[in-house]
Structures are given as C-alpha cells and as structure tokens.
Image (spheres, coloured by chain):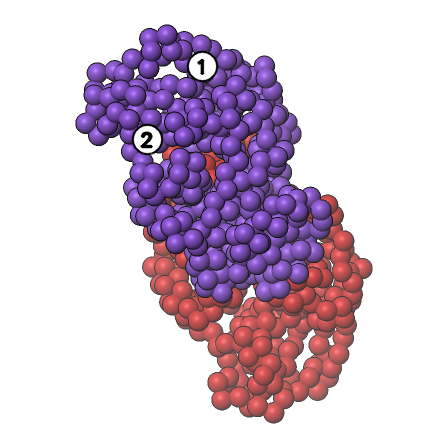
Chain colours: A purple, B red
Amino acid sequence: MTTAAMNHQFRLARRPIGLPNADDWQRTTEPVPAAPEGGVLVQTLALSLDPAMRGWMNEGKSYIPPVGIGEVMRAGGVGRVLASSHPKFAQGSLVSGVLGVQEYAAFDAAGIKRAGLVPIDTRLGTVTQWLNVLGMPGMTAYFGLLDVGMPQPGHTVVVSGAAGAVGQTVGQLAKIKGCRVVGIAGGTAKCDWVMNELGFDACIDYKAGNVRAGLKQHCPNGVDVYFDNVGGDILDEVLARLAMNARIVICGAISQYNNTTPIQGPKNYLSLLVHRARMQGMVVFDYASRFPQAVAELSGYLKDGRLKSREDVVQGIDNFPDALNRLFSGANFGKLVLGVAPLDA
Amino acid sequence: MTTAAMNHQFRLARRPIGLPNADDWQRTTEPVPAAPEGGVLVQTLALSLDPAMRGWMNEGKSYIPPVGIGEVMRAGGVGRVLASSHPKFAQGSLVSGVLGVQEYAAFDAAGIKRAGLVPIDTRLGTVTQWLNVLGMPGMTAYFGLLDVGMPQPGHTVVVSGAAGAVGQTVGQLAKIKGCRVVGIAGGTAKCDWVMNELGFDACIDYKAGNVRAGLKQHCPNGVDVYFDNVGGDILDEVLARLAMNARIVICGAISQYNNTTPIQGPKNYLSLLVHRARMQGMVVFDYASRFPQAVAELSGYLKDGRLKSREDVVQGIDNFPDALNRLFSGANFGKLVLGVAPLDA
C-alpha cells in the first residue's frame, strides 16, 4: 500500500422511499486509514449484496439497528489483511466480516468483534463462494432449512428465489437430504439452471405463468416445507397448497421491500390452522456459534460435487447503487457480488 | 318418551354470504327416530354454539368436510340416552358428542364413533361446563396453550376473545401456569369480569380504545405467547409487540368469518422474522386421545376453585339462528350454549 492510496466509500445519504435511487447515496473519498494498535487494516476484495440491505436502510426497530444517515453502508465482504497487530490475523491472509461498502476498512480489537471478522480458508471455497455457500446465504439456507424447516426424506420442499443466493443452496441441500424439491424463479434461464444444473425436480417460472397451477402440478401431495424469500402473492399461493403439519420458513420478502404501501399480509394464513402448519421467522446471526459446523458440511459437498454455486459478480465499487437494485428487479442470476478489488489479487 | 314425540331440527338450506340469515336455515319436523340395533337414541339437552360453525357452512376444503345443503347443522352437544342397546351407554346416562342442531339424535354403532359420542360424568362438571371447560373449548384452550403456545412461568400471554369460551380458559390456565395474562375483549363488563373474577392481570377493551396503546402499557417486555381467536387488526397489533421467540397460536379468526371480501392477512407478519417467532395453527380434534388427561386436570381446577367458567345459555332450539349470530356481534358473554331441553331434566 502506498501512502497515496485513497478509500472510496458509499454512505447512506437519506432513507429511500421505495426503490433506492442515486440520490440516496453519497460517494466519499478519504485517505486509507492506518491499522489501529491491536487491530487490522483490511482491503475489500468483494462485497455481498443482499436483499436484507434494503431493510437496514429503513428507520425503525428490526433485528439489527438501521444504518445511520451519513454512515458507510453496511455490507458483508471478504478482504485481505494489509496490516495487522492482532495475533489472530496474519498480514496477507483473507478474512470475512462486515466490511461496509468501501475499499478499505480498519478495525481495532472491539471493531473486529463487532464486524464479526474471521479468517477464511480458500481451500474450502473461492472468495465468492465465501460470500455465497460458505457465507451468510449458505448459513441462512443451512439453518433455515434444517433447523426451522425440518425436512424429512421424501418431503416436498418448495423454495422461492430458487436461483438466488439462499435459494440455490436451500434446494440443493434439500435434495441431498432426500427431499423432492420444487423451485420458484423468474425466467426460463433460471428455471432451466436449477433443474438441469442443480438437480431440482421442478421449477415454476413465476414470470411466465400460473404459480397456482405449477404448485398443483408439481406438489400433488402438498408442500411440506416452504422456504420463503419473496413474500407477496407467491406466499399466498403456497399457503393454499400446504400439506398437513407443514413448516414455512420466513427468511425474507423481497417482493415487499420497496413497497410504498403497507406490506401485503398473507390472506391465506388460516391455511396454517386447517393444516396444523406453522410459519416461523429466522435470522442467520442466531446460529453464529454453529457456522463452523455448517461450513464444514457445505464445503464437503462443494468438494465432492454434490453442491454447486453460482455467483453474479458486478465489478467496481462505483457500480454499487445499480448493482444493488438488480436484486429487486431479479436481474441478478445467482448470488450477487460486488467485486471491489481484482478477485485474483 | 311417547310415540307422539316429534324431532325439530335446523338444516342448512343454502350457503350464507356474509352473516347467516333466516333464509339460510330450514326448520324441519320429523318423528323421533328409534334407537338402531346396537345403537342409542339421545335427547339433546344443550348444544355448543361455536365460531367454527360458520366455517362448516362454507363450501370448500377445510379441516372437516362442510355441512351439506339439506343436512342437519353440525353441532356438538350434551344429551341424555333415552334408549340403548350399546353396552357402553346406559339408558338415562349423559353423553357428549356431535348431536347436531336437533332435539333427538339416533346413532348406530358406526354413527356413535363418527359423532365421537362419549359418556360424561356430571360429578366433574355441570352439563354446560361439559360444553365449555370440559368440552371442545376447554380442550382447545388446554392443548393450544400448552402444546402449541408452550408458555413458561413469567411469560406474558395475551389472549383475544378473552371472555369467550376458549379465551376464559386460556387465560386462567396461563395464570395457573405462572404467566402474566393480558386479555383482549369487547366492553367494560367483559374486561372487568376477566380481571376481577378470573384474575387476569389486565384486559384491553378493543371496543373502547386503542389496542396498540393497551398492549404497549400492559406488555412492556413484549408478548411471549399470543392465543388468537379473532384475527384481523388485533392480530396485526399483537404482531407488532412480539417478544423474541414468541409463539402465536392460530385458533380462529372470528373477525373474518363473515367477510364478503378476502380474509385480511396479517400485514405485520414479518415481525415473525424480526423476533424469530412462529405462528402455528391448531385443530382440537388432533388431541382427542389426550382429552381424558386434560379433563382430569381441568376438572381438578374447577373443583379447587382455581378455574371458573361462565356460560351464556340461550334457551329454546327455535332461537338457534339468532343465538348463533350473537357470536359474531360479540353479544354473548361467556361460552354460548343453546339450551334445547330443560337443563335440570
């Protein structure tokens, strides 16, 4: 690192109404900070762009405090340790954690904890896989499906956002566990991929057709586990096809995140009563102590070829605002990643 | 019984749209049937009028087949065995089961099973208590609260329809189990009763005021268990006040049963995600094998005075249509019972 290096950042300029636009962001340039005593300086290699980020931009109580106006936008990422006086982090090693939408991030010992900074081992997966299968989306899929969804062999598992970061791992993991898996995704290309490459049993293209008819065709015995990433009408359609004692994992509701009107509540929720079913929310951070177990299992599946991953990398920090919005139009195909430094660096 | 005795019945004439009205019913008169060989003839003493009956009048898939047009309306009740050639049922003994809205019901051996006819012991509770605490409402309260709601001592339990059949037992049972209990009911009289007579810690009068403010005041640490009998806006208000890992028991949604527009879905359902909470439906029939255990426990509480019950008895089978509709206006105060024969008979 030369002393001339500058740090580019995206800060939240104001709280968006509906879909975020350029004026909601402030791009700042600062000198690269020094590594604090007992801490580290990290260069961001790649950032995870996630639907949940939209929620973090809103005011109000949630499972995590909102990003403050003027603060660097919160984002998980993988980076390289440029300087360190912390015994756990060697210079040159790779780490993951909440780096923020910026090219460099400095942390003291307390900041390392707050950011959840941990070393990563690229023998287990690539940098982008550490933002996908081995990162938060994979952890969300693993614990959401197994701990909350509790599928049994032979069960029918439906997952929305099937080609997305969480959905792709949910579906493949459910297949590995012996379930019948039906994806819901937008467009032929995504549906073909989850069926032909990932081995899902069926996929319903919600942009092309009739989700209700697709569920009826592909889930003749009802839906035992529904992993919901989207909310809205699709949640209602699945509610109408539940099997007895079904479990719905509420992971997200991307269809509702940019609403300027109230959230659409599931009008078929009384199907929970008829089918003695349950709908349960989950937040991945609760399972942090068990991440190593999940990483070990999932990286094993990556190694033996039973688990595949697809990342959609948009290169360049200046593309952050547009890249984030690709999530909401469904333009991304696979886990959306913002490349900040050359990934082969 | 004389040979001249006639049996009056209410049959479903057509499927109601919205609130049932007089034209939805057909009153019929038939000779009292004989007890079939190996079966029983039962004289109805009292019938249970329940919100669920409204659902049974609709066409379509539910947890139980709809009542057919022209069929005697389904209703649980307590009756006296007038004639029997079944070894389990002595002449003159009392039974409970699905008798239907009629003065007399005859069952062969298969019909006895279908109707769930069982002897009742009036030393454990009165005839009307056998339709309330010791009947379906009490069983619903017991298994819904304990098995699905899973309250722990010190938890805050909120129950809607607090003065109703299920709600009164839910709240008292939660108190017995060491919880803090907040009721939601319509009107000062009902709120005063659940607080002063049943020992609830607080009650929010939804007709008078602001449910949101009441929940904020009386549930400062959030709601651990919500037992929902009403749905609609109240469900949304409670969702907005959940504690972490809360459980919502979906028992019913009386506010929505006479809708002529779609059911109102809970627009705050993403609170399940924020609070890692779950919403689960229950149907009391699933717990039938454990009813004796619940009856034993609840009748013990009745005996030692820890559990009280209140029934609102409307006398006369011809009052059935109007009496049923009292449920939907909230005019009943306590478990609504239709007296068909003199209860001291």
Q: Earlier in the sequence, mark 2 or mark 1?
A: 1
Task: Give the x, y percent position of residue A235.
Answer: 60, 47
- Residue at 69% in and 84% down: B33
Give the image location of residue B19, x and y in percent. 72, 51
Residue at the location (42% across, 68% down)? B290
In the rendered view, tell whether residue B43 sits above or below residue B299: below
Q: Residue furthest right?
A: B23
Q: What chain letter is assigned to the residue under label 2?
A: A
Q: Amino acid at mark 2?
A: Val
Camera sees residue A171: yes
* Disc 1 residue type (three-letter): His
Is the residue B332 above or below the residue A232 in the image? below
User: Which residue is pictured at 25% across the width and 25% down the height?
Assistant: A91
Q: Secondary structure at mark 1?
A: strand
Percent coordinates x, y for residue A195 in the rendering: 58, 54
Q: Residues within 10 Å of mark 2 (few under 14, many from 20)?
A: many
Quote the CA–CA distance across marks 2 and 1. 20 Å
Q: Residue at x 67, y 55 (%)?
A: A214
- Tag on residue A8? 1
Chain letter belonging to callout 1 = A
| Disc 2 with disc 1 on a shared chain | yes
Q: Is residue B307 left or right of residue A109?
A: right
Drawn side of residue A345 relative to residue B253, left or right: left
Give x and y (percent) for residue B129: 49, 63
Mark drawn on residue A95 = 2
Q: Which sits in the foreground, B212 or B286? A: B286
Q: Quadrant of the N terminus of chain B?
A: bottom right
